[in-house]
Image: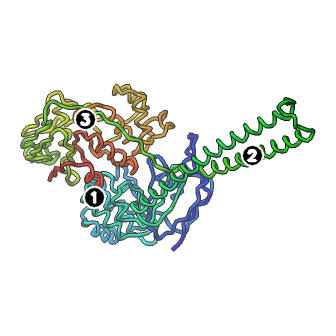
Amino acid sequence: MSKINVSDVTFCYDGSYHNIFEHVSFSVDSDWKLGLIGRNGKGKTTFLNLLLGKYEYQGAITSSVVFGYFPYEVTDERKGQCSADFLEIWRPGCELWRVICELEKLGLTADVLYRPFGTLSNGEQTKVMLAVLFSGENDFLLIDEPTNHLDQESRALVKEYLFQKKSFILVSHDRDLLDACVDHVLVLNRHTIEIQSGNFSSWQLNKERIDAFHQSENEKHSREIKKLKKAADRAANWADKNERTKIGYDPIKEHDRGNGTRPYIGAKTKKMQSRVKQMEERIQNEIEQKEGLLCDIEKPVDLKIMPLKHHKERLILVKGYGLSYPALGGQEKAAALPEIILEGVDFQLNQGERVFLQGENGCGKSSLIKAILSHVKQKDEMGLQGLAETAMESGEIETASGMVISYINQDTSFLKGNLTEFCRERKLDESLFKAILRQLDLERVQFGKDMEAYSEGQKKKVLIAASLLKQAHLYIWDEPLNYIDIFSRMQIENLILRYQPTMLVVEHDRYFQEKIATRVFSLS
């Protein structure tokens, strides 16, 4: 076991005017299974890159371990190649037999290494990368959000696989994964950094207790400060009033006043002023004890949504729906069978329901959403391109007339330009839109930046804020929580449970589904 020591590290990106890390110091044991937790934009991926030596920084990071990083870079050229051809590029000295052994633990066979990487599903690509990552020995591995875009079955396999491993830092917003796979947590709070033993749930329980104690202490100090200020003001007034009696007096009312009265009054005033000074010192001491108590407390602001009520009870009816595309390539192209995406789907959505579409990657969940949106004539909403012209449909999709839909696309690559341009194009109230982003903890400093420079989590918050701002009968969200931090997920959960909008959702976060869904519809 060795230590990874971070000592007085300060880091800021070129051109930025605020530090990501400032005088940060802590130590990590290399045999820990460490979960890295924090809000979007707090520097989780940046910290991993600092460990890898990608950026220059002030301070020191020392360790005797070799770092490996997930995900590996996949160029366009490599997408057309088999994984077996470039394993050595990803991990120098990688041995094929070790990778195959790791793949078996992830439920895959060696044949995935001999298929073009771009043809593999998201789950298969993730598992190949993890198998390569863990195929060596004595490395300390940096794993950055491995379950994004994975279906629940693939997530369960990755969770079981990581549970058996050690010596890694896992960046994830999946509470289920963090609870199952880590034995320590490194938390990037709002102003401080802390390390605790245990998983996410144990840390959250401890944080709730600590936050409650700090709030109680803050209230106690506030009451004491208020009481001391009143006493100090009262004593100061007494001293001033007493001091004014030193000069000038009424000989009739104060006939017994002698030459020694004035020094006596002065001494009494001095004593009162000393008491005032002591109270002011106590007030300052209470203020100093109060400072910092609430600096790391998470106070998620209650979000708002304004769903519309439709005059029809049933909003969507899908009867025997099928979707396919013409087969591509091949000598017998004309006679080739079409690629079937969906077949014989029967589904309906009533007002007030929150239906989650469930199924493995590639089963057609997003395609069904695109088909529904195409029938509602909202193809241009938030980056959606609709079904391709070559799509062949069968069966029926009926949608309520006049229905308004608010949509979140799982893809964020279409986000370009700044927030002002984004609001203008979509006719959004810019001030309200930015207010929602602030409630989702997007810092004001981000408002002037181009969205292409945002992290994936920050881009997702842009789409979520735009969806919340739009009044709609139905909210269709396609994997809205990918890259979204845990605290924002809790905000969104509370919002949905409070306002209960009608929703059609694709989301693989098990916690979120169990808390929000009124019904789950499985696609084979």
Picture layout, residue 517 above or below residue 4: above
Q: As displayed, is residue 198 above or below residue 218? A: below
Image spot of residue 504 (x, y percent)? 22, 42
As helix, strand or loop, the secondary structure at mark 3 comes to loop
Q: Comparing marks 2 and 1, which lies closer to the viewer?
A: 2
Relative side of 477 to 37, left or right = left
Q: In this rendering, would 22 be left or right of 427? A: right
In the rendered structure, which amino acid carries the disc numbered 2? Lys
Q: Position of residue 42 (x, y in %)?
A: 49, 49
Crowd rating for badge 1 (residues with CA inside 10 Å; few <14, some 14–19, many 20+): many
Of mark 3 and mark 2, the one earlier in the sequence is 2
Specify whether residue 29 is in view.
yes
Q: Are marks 1 and 3 in contact (CB under 8 Å)?
A: no
Q: Residue at x 39, y 61 (%)?
A: 201
Which three-letter amino acid code belongs to the residue tagged 3?
A: Gln
The disc placed on residue 385 is 3
Q: Please name the residue that numbered disc 1 is placed on.
A: 124
Q: Secondary structure at mark 2?
A: helix
Distance between the alpha carbons at the discs numbered 3 and 2:
71 Å
Q: Is label 3 or label 2 in front?
A: 2
Give the spatial CA distance, label 1 vs label 3: 26 Å
Left or right of 286? Residue 431 is left
Q: Secondary structure at mark 1?
A: helix
For the residue pair 150 and 132, the one nearer the viewer reads as 150
- Do the residues bearing badges 2 and 1 touch, measured as CB atoms within 8 Å? no
Q: Position of residue 28 (x, y in %)?
A: 52, 65
Residue linked to disc 2: 277
Q: What residue is rendered at 14% in x and 42% in y?
A: 325
Measure how far apart labels 2 and 1 are at the Cα level.
Answer: 71 Å
Circle nearer the N terminus (2, 1): 1
